[in-house]
Amino acid sequence: MAVLLHRLGHSAYRHRKLVLGIWLFVLAALITCVSVFGGKLDDRFSVPGTESQRALDSLSQTLPEASGASAQIVFTAPEGRLVTEAPYTAAIAEAVAEAERAPQVGEVVAPGASGAVSADRTTAIVQVQYPVQIAEVRTSSVDAIEDAARAAETDGLRTSVGGSVFSSKGVHIGPSEIIGVAVALLVLVVTFGSLLAAGMALLPALIGVALGLAGLLALAPAVSISSTAVTLALMLGLAVGIDYVLFILSRHRQQLARGTEPKESVALAVGTAGSAVVFAGVTVIIALAALSVIGIPFLTTMGLGAAGAVLIAVLAAITLVPAVAGFAGSRLAPKPGSRAGRRAADVEGSADAEGSADVEGVGDAERSTGRATMGTRWTKWVIAKPLLTVLAVAGILVTLTLPAMDLRLALPDNGSAPHASTERQAYDTISEKFGPGFNGPLLVLVETNNGTAAASSQAGAQVAQQLGTLKDVKAVLPPQPTSDPAQSVITVLPASGPDSVRTDQLVRDIREAAPGIHDTTGATVAVTGTTAVNIDVSNRLSDSLLPFVAIVVGLSLLLLMIVFRSLVIPVKAAVGFLLSVGASLGLVVAVFQWGWLADVLDVPHSGPVVSFLPIILIGVLFGLAMDYEVFLVSGMREEWAHTGRARQSVVDGARHSVRVVTAAALIMFTVFAGFFPLDDALIKPIAFALAVGVAIDAFAVRMTLVPAVLALAGRGAWWLPAWLDRILPDLDVEGSSLQKAAPAGSEELEPVSLEPTQGRATATDLTATDSTTADSTPPDSTAPGRGERREASGSR
């Protein structure tokens, strides 16, 4: 893979105008497709094969108003007055007439017809039903409903409008996201010490993100794509896109500072750092694409859309970066004498000198004083007492994980909307005046074998009577006929809210009572409606969580065993990954479910966690954890192969990687955190979980726990049974094949001369010893070099 990427880097550099032109042409074509054929986003949640979905699909044919979108106009009389007074009933009647004239509206039910007048007669509700789904409701129709409500306010009524038509419908780009990108640019400037380099790192990432979003939106007319899927693709595309470019461009600038020709430097950077980028990207893609096996359409499109964004980010890193770097040429090289230049060109430090072998951030003057980099000092500190470090970090992360034991999953509704929004005001008013169950009614589809309307009506009445006896049922409305004479629909109002455990139990109780109802009435019943569908989605996701974790952890063990030829490192990485996920979920539960710091963090509602958040978090964090694991541990493994000193290799290897991984983690954190201020009940907790997950995994697990565990394991950290070493494939993620002599006639590989005595070239060694220097100091003759690895791996 390294050789192939090396040649790709050469080709992209030579044909930079063509490469850039292709990217811009494809981007322009996709934007044109979106503007001409752009379809609407679809935020429906469905679970094919479940009882609720089958019943809802049937109702979409026989009673579209019951299965389509809905809106509610809530009228509240002034203090001391009643909504049933003549002036107010006239205003409500006028609002009903206006709503009936709104486009796309199928049915408007006045309070007098539905009985939706509160017990104290201060509040009334007008129900608006659409025969189409949420994605098909036009903005003009919703505006007409809002105008009808506002007209009643002139008569003194307070109004608010809610319902499913106010669910999230678009991609959110605002000041917080722009600030996140600006902070990422600042991190790049500090990391590179150059505004030009930072800008050139951001450009390929932004082009890749734009292309990914345009491609996803271009599919909207043909594929059901939710606004959450687009926002998640944007979030991940920005984060990994900037990070992947950072890894490759850092390696390129470090080599330029050593005097490497720009074309050869780009090719070598793509062949080494690019190999690890491809590996990391593929792990993220696999984890996200695995969401499709759960069998929930909206989650499948979400996973595949995000995976597509990551794929484009990888392609941009290995093609656009060398092309853009070709336009800059040698101008990307750090200025001689600058801190960045000294850091990149400092290649002669002795790894034998304790604390003085600093090639990460120490110049000649600093080395002469014995000062070490921050990464070196931190690594030495955490491995000074490795057992204490492991116990402390593990203890803290386990403590943060404890709230996750109380994790409850559900899909958000208007009760999670911002307090100032009209849908939240309508939701709260209905809960207060009519009970929380009025916001989440259950629809019970009753079907009889006798196809007459009279038999269906009689069976429906009997079913309604039996449903009224169940626990947690507040009211049962009379059966409503459909266009199918054998069908009727009963609306059941729970005593609890849509996201309550009691409502979930009521759905289970109705389904458990179905056989008995069939025996006594001859009718079959099925629970459906938005609330029941959301409950089924959450239950399906809960059931899929543990198998998905097992697949991801098993995959991580296999991949890392192949990359690092070790048993300890994969197990350590998997345990660290689980600790990161557990701690992140624990913090999510504490903030979003328990309400801790909710006011400080502007969380509008505390309740169950978004049902697909854990799976999204696991899939994304898995890829990022593997990313940081490869970039950190490969440097340590290189030092081990070079010197054979297990403990010192942890320190020397970390100094190569800590700086760039720190920058990458900060960029990830700021991009994800930039989406947290959004007033979106789906995106807000996901952004929070990903931001804290990246911070925990990068700084607590990879930079602290990993060095401590490797120091404890010593030489055993790099042990692998010889028989297993022989059968495992060599992915060459670290680019070691570039050490081999170039084949005859291979122009691309001729300039690459990585001396075998220097050990394996690592993708993370952005500031490592210059492998092109002919007079490099030979390694310790007792160290296990690459050629000896297979023979030495069979024993400790």
Image (cartoon, rainbow, N blue to C red):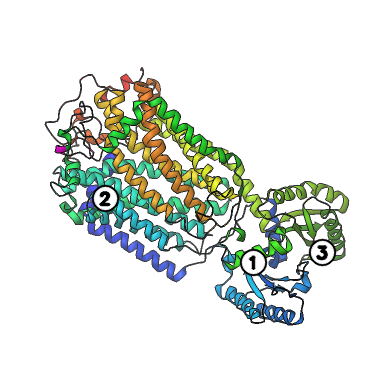
Q: Which residue is mark 2?
A: 190
Q: Label 3 belongs to which residue? A: 478
Element on which disc 3 rests: loop
Q: Between marks 3 and 2, how big is the CA–CA gap?
A: 68 Å
- Is residue 463 shown above or below 363? below
- When asked about the image quadrant of residue 167, the answer is bottom right
Please provide percent x and percent y for residue 56.
69, 59
Label 3: few (<14), some (14–19) or many (≥20) C-alpha neighbours in 10 Å: some
Secondary structure category for the residue under label 2:
helix
Determine if residue 477 is in view.
yes
Q: Amino acid at mark 1?
A: Ala
Tell me if mark 2 has few (under 14), some (14-19) or many (20+) residues whose alpha carbon lies within 10 angstroms of its own.
some
Instruction: Name the mark nearer the viewer: 3 or 2.
Output: 2
Instruction: Identify the mark nearer the N-term, 1 or 2.
Output: 2
Q: Which residues are magenta?
A: 353-365
The reply to whether dot 3 and dot 1 touch (C-beta < 8 Å) is no
* Residue that sits furthest to the front in the current view: 80
Question: In the rendering, at what x and y percent does residue 215 appear?
Answer: 42, 60
Residue, disc 1: 426
Q: Earlier along the polypeptide chain: callout 3 or callout 1?
A: 1
Q: Is residue 510 left or right of residue 533?
A: right
Please state which amino acid type lies under the numbered disc 3: Pro
- Cα gap from disc 3 to disc 1, whole angstroms: 25 Å
Say what amino acid the circle numbered 2 marks: Val
Q: Nearer the viewer, residue 602 or 406?
A: 602
Q: SS class of the residue under badge 1? A: helix
Task: Please tell me whether mark 3 or mark 1 is closer to you in this view.
Answer: 1
Q: Nearer the viewer, residue 505 or 550?
A: 505
